Amino acid sequence: MLIATFELEHDAVALTQAFTDEPEMKVEAERIAAHSTKWTMPCLWVASNNFDTADEALSNDPSIRRIVETTSFEEEKYYHLEWADDVEERVNKYIDQQGSILHAEATAHGWQLRIRFVSRDQFDRFRKRLTEQDHSFELLDLTEPGSPRVSFGELTPAQHNALVAAQEHGYYEVPREISARELAEKLDISHQSLSELLRRGTGKIIESTLSTQDVPADI
């Protein structure tokens, strides 16, 4: 089994027009399904400085059939949507290579997908399919769980510093000894930036320690 992180152009996945209209937004898929394109990445968390602009950009993007519902929070907005047929077909081709998408996020620079492959042959066929479709891509990380050194989705320095600071200042204590806003002020970053660093950093730790482990059968 291999776990690979790819950076792909928007055309290889979706939201090309949306990021052209609103390049400042950041998108992260909440739920990824391995065996059904109907439920592949149907739920997105979007961070934007202007959600009215983000709403319009996503509504006008041809890769989205319709937005089913949205829920607004202080710094992010949740979108439940249905992808257009061509997006489902495109993703289905990736899934046909027996790759399971573990994580997906997008910025104006493109998509980052972390995918689990059953074998090296399936990994090679996935890259060949991207090349055949003239999609540019970059392999950012490739690891093999079970090898002497397992490293996938490593924390960035900023994520590492934020997590360590949160632990040291009692953010994870019950009750909390410091609020998120207070911690953000200590780190001299915005509350939104801290929230993203902690969430993404925690997600990477969970993926690296839990996502690839076999779930023991009930005894």
Image: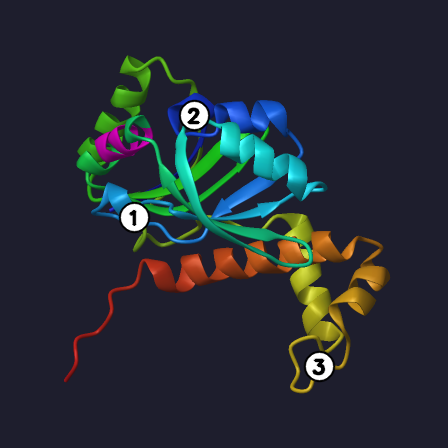
Between 7 and 85, the residue placed more toward the observer is 85
Asked if residue 128 lies left or right of residue 185, the reply is left
Q: Position of residue 158 (x, y in %)?
A: 69, 51
Looking at the picture, which amino acid does disc 2 mark? Pro
Q: Which residues are magenta?
A: 87-93
Q: Which mark is residue 30?
A: none
Labels 3, 1: front one: 1
User: Can you identify the residue that label 2 sits on?
Assistant: 62
Q: Is residue 9 visible?
A: no
Compared with 22, 44 (above or below) is below
Local secondary structure at mark 1: helix
Asked if residue 195 lies left or right of residue 83, the reply is right
Q: Position of residue 83 (x, y in %)?
A: 36, 36
User: Can you identify the residue that label 1 sits on?
Assistant: 39
Name the main secondary structure of what is drawn in magenta.
helix
Label whose residue precedes the other's in the sequence (3 or 2): 2
Question: What residue sits 27% from the left and 14% below the top?
Answer: 132
Compared with 80, 172 (above or below) is below
Labels 3, 2: front one: 2
Q: Which mark is residue 176?
A: 3
Q: Are marks 1 and 2 in contact (CB under 8 Å)?
A: no
Mark 1, Cα crowd under 10 Å, few <14 / some 14-19 / many 20+, is: some
User: Does residue 76 show up magenta in the picture?
Assistant: no
Distance Cα–Cα, label 1 vs label 2 = 18 Å
Quadrant the C terminus occupies: bottom left
Q: Is residue 168 visible?
A: yes
Q: Position of residue 86 (x, y in %)?
A: 30, 26
Looking at the picture, which amino acid does disc 1 mark? Trp
Label whose residue precedes the other's in the sequence (3 or 1): 1
Between 149 and 81, the residue placed more toward the observer is 81
